[in-house]
Image: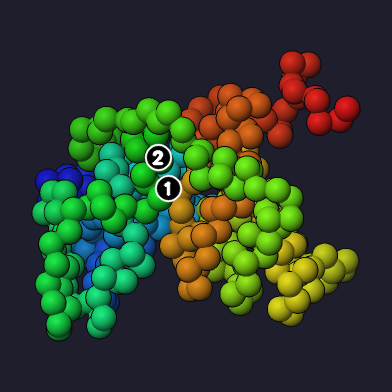
């Protein structure tokens, strides 16, 4: 991982020195352990701020949009793992940005850690976090643990089949092996096996602690609408309070807005302060897009999402 960090810094310094990019968007250490945060670097003197490790779970494509690029003559460089790059591709396909505005520093990803799972292993606050290959060394005032990274991976990373950026300008390390899963959507199948009443109860329980902070929406690189439907007042689509119907409506409509576009990056789950597994909504739609249309988002700059095009061969049993 240290070699990868040094390569990212070297690439960034070279790009700035040659004037090829104006800003490099990457990750830096946060103020507390396991809290890597996005950072924009515009000077070679600040290159040491750039890091990359198993806590860099947010999706940096969220910081690249028409607004951030408007009026800029030079490119913006983005440090992008597989899911970040796939969302950049989605932005390009949806005409939010153009390919010549972005320089992609690709980073092969071996997975991000589940910070809540790690925190649950301690009774007090974590004070140190270090990563040595596939081993994590985590400390608090009361104890020190050595943990295998594979034991605390986020679920979306466990089932990820595209850890390498599909589009990039340069790679900061050699690509990692991509896995093939016999049952990539076992979690979706478990919910689908429930009867309708049990399924409804499952999702009601899932969202019962939602405080409508919209952190999931704000962390999602797909939510770039100038005015979100929850903020519309004329007409008002969703109420502003904690009514369960309004909470459920927000989550289902947001999920369908992401249909055929979601890369399962997990940024929504990472951002939720209540620990709600928001992916439960989008995973079913990802499965449908794959099984009905052979589609996975963000892999091809030349193809548009299935809900954005029409083909005479499209499945249409749903209208019978």
Q: Name above or below for residue 169 compared with residue 204.
A: above
In whole angstroms, how far apart are the C-alphas of marks 1 and 2?
A: 6 Å
Q: Position of residue 174 (x, y in %)?
A: 20, 33
Q: Residues within 10 Å of mark 2 (few under 14, many from 20)?
A: many
Q: Which mark is residue 212?
A: none
Residue under the image location 40 percent in, 31 percent down:
181
Q: Which residue is mark 1?
A: 156
Q: Name above or below for residue 255 compared with residue 175.
A: below
Q: Which residue is mark 2?
A: 160
Residue 66 lies left or right of residue 146; in this view the side is right
Residue 238 lies left or right of residue 43; in this view the side is right
Residue 72 lies left or right of residue 24; in this view the side is right
Residue under the image location 15 percent in, 83 percent down:
141
Q: Give the camera-side residue of 193 and 27.
A: 193
User: Answer yes or no: do the residues labelled 1 and 2 have beta carbons within 8 Å?
Assistant: yes
Residue under the image location 22 percent in, 64 percent down:
49
Q: Position of residue 318 (x, y in %)?
A: 81, 31
Q: In this rendering, does residue 58 appear at all? A: yes
Residue under the image location 29 percent in, 43 percent down:
109
Instruction: Label 1: state its secondary structure.
Output: helix
Q: In this rendering, does residue 227 appear at all? A: no
Q: What is the quadrant of residue 218 in the picture?
A: bottom right
Q: What is the quadrant of residue 308 in the picture?
A: top right
Q: Residues within 10 Å of mark 1 (few under 14, many from 20)?
A: some
């Amino acid at each position: 991982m240290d070699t990868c960090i040094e390569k990212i810094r070297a690439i960034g310094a070279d790009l700035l020195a040659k004037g090829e990019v104006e800003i490099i968007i990457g990750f830096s250490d946060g103020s507390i352990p396991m809290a890597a945060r996005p950072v924009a670097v515009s000077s070679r003197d600040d290159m040491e701020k750039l890091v990359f490790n198993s806590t860099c779970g947010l999706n940096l494509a969220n910081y690249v949009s028409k607004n951030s690029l408007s009026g800029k003559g030079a490119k913006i460089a983005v440090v992008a793992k597989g899911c970040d790059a796939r969302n950049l591709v989605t932005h390009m396909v949806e005409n939010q940005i153009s390919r010549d505005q972005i320089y992609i520093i690709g980073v092969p990803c071996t997975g991000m850690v589940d910070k809540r799972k790690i925190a649950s292993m301690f009774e007090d606050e974590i004070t140190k976090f270090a990563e040595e290959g596939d081993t994590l060394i985590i400390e608090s005032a009361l104890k020190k643990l050595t943990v295998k990274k594979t034991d605390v991976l986020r679920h979306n990373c466990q089932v990820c089949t595209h850890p390498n950026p599909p589009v990039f300008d340069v790679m900061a390390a050699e690509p990692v092996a991509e896995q093939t899963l016999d049952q990539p959507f076992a979690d979706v199948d478990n919910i689908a096996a429930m009867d309708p009443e049990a399924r409804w109860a499952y999702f009601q329980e899932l969202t019962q602690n939602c405080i409508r902070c919209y952190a999931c929406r704000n962390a999602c690189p797909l939510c770039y609408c100038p005015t979100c439907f929850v903020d519309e007042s004329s007409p008002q689509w969703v109420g502003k309070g904690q009514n369960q119907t309004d909470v459920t409506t927000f989550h289902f409509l947001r999920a369908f807005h992401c249909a055929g576009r979601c890369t399962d990056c997990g940024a929504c789950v990472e951002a939720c302060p209540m620990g709600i597994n928001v992916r439960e909504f989008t995973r079913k739609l990802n499965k449908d897009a794959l099984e009905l249309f052979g589609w996975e988002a963000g892999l091809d700059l030349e193809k548009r999402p299935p809900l954005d095009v029409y083909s005479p061969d499209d499945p249409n049993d749903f209208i019978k």
